[in-house]
């Protein structure tokens, strides 16, 4: 097990709570944004959580991975559905590396001297 999410998540929530005590408006704003995304409308909860999990991987957020993997499981996602969503995240990261590699090579070509 790379990260024990059962141990990690409560510690993370405690740390976020302390941040909220120090900066309540920040946490209130985040809660409003998160709540608006969670309400949804067209996408069901499972689909939203699969997207969130894939985004969590692309943004390299361990806390997001812990929270959204649990939420995806609770919403009924299967291991195969999670794996497929993660395959999309992997492909997107590779695509981003391809685009930024092209930009880097272009920048290199702009250098003089």
Image (cartoon, rainbow, N blue to C red):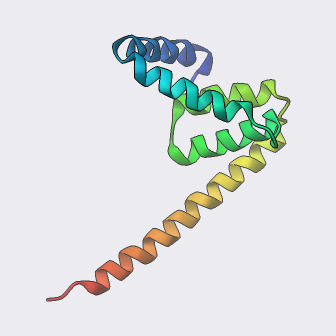
Answer whether residue 24 is visible to the viewer in this image: yes
Could you say which is closer to the camera, residue 64 or residue 82?
A: 64
Residue depicted at x 72% and y 36%: 49
User: Horizontally, is 10 left or right of 41 in the view?
Assistant: left
Q: Where is residue 44 in the image (x, y as percent from the top left)?
A: 83, 37
Residue 60 vs 75, above or below: the answer is: below
Residue 2 visible? no
Q: Position of residue 97 (x, y in %)?
A: 50, 65
- Please, which residue is most extreme toward the bottom here? 113
Q: Residue at position x 56%, y 18% from top?
A: 9
Q: Residue at x 52, y 71 (%)?
A: 98
Q: In this view, does 75 lie to the left or right of 106?
A: right
In the depicted structure, whether residue 102 falls above or below residue 28: below
Where residue 105 sits, quadrant-wise, is: bottom left
Question: Is 1 drawn above or below residue 81 in the view shown?
Answer: above
Image quadrant where residue 41 sits? top right
Quadrant occupied by the N terminus: top right
Image quarter of the C terminus: bottom left
Judge by depth and name the residue closer to the eye, 16 or 36.
36
The image quarter containing residue 83 is top right
Q: Which of 80 and 19 is in front in this view?
A: 19
Q: How many marks?
A: 0
Residue at 51% over, 36% down: 61
Reply above or below: 37 against 29: below
Residue sticking out furthest to the left: 113
């Amino acid at each position: 097990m790379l990260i024990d999410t059962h141990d990690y998540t409560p510690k993370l929530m405690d740390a976020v709570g302390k941040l909220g005590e120090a900066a309540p408006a920040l946490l209130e704003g985040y809660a409003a944004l998160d709540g608006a995304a969670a309400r949804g409308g067209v996408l069901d909860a499972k689909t939203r959580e699969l997207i969130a999990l894939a985004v969590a991987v692309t943004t390299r957020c361990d806390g997001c991975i812990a929270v959204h993997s649990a939420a995806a499981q609770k919403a009924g996602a299967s291991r195969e559905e999670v794996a497929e969503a993660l395959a999309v995240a992997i492909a997107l990261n590779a695509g981003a590396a391809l685009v930024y590699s092209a930009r880097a090579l272009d920048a290199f070509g702009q250098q003089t001297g």
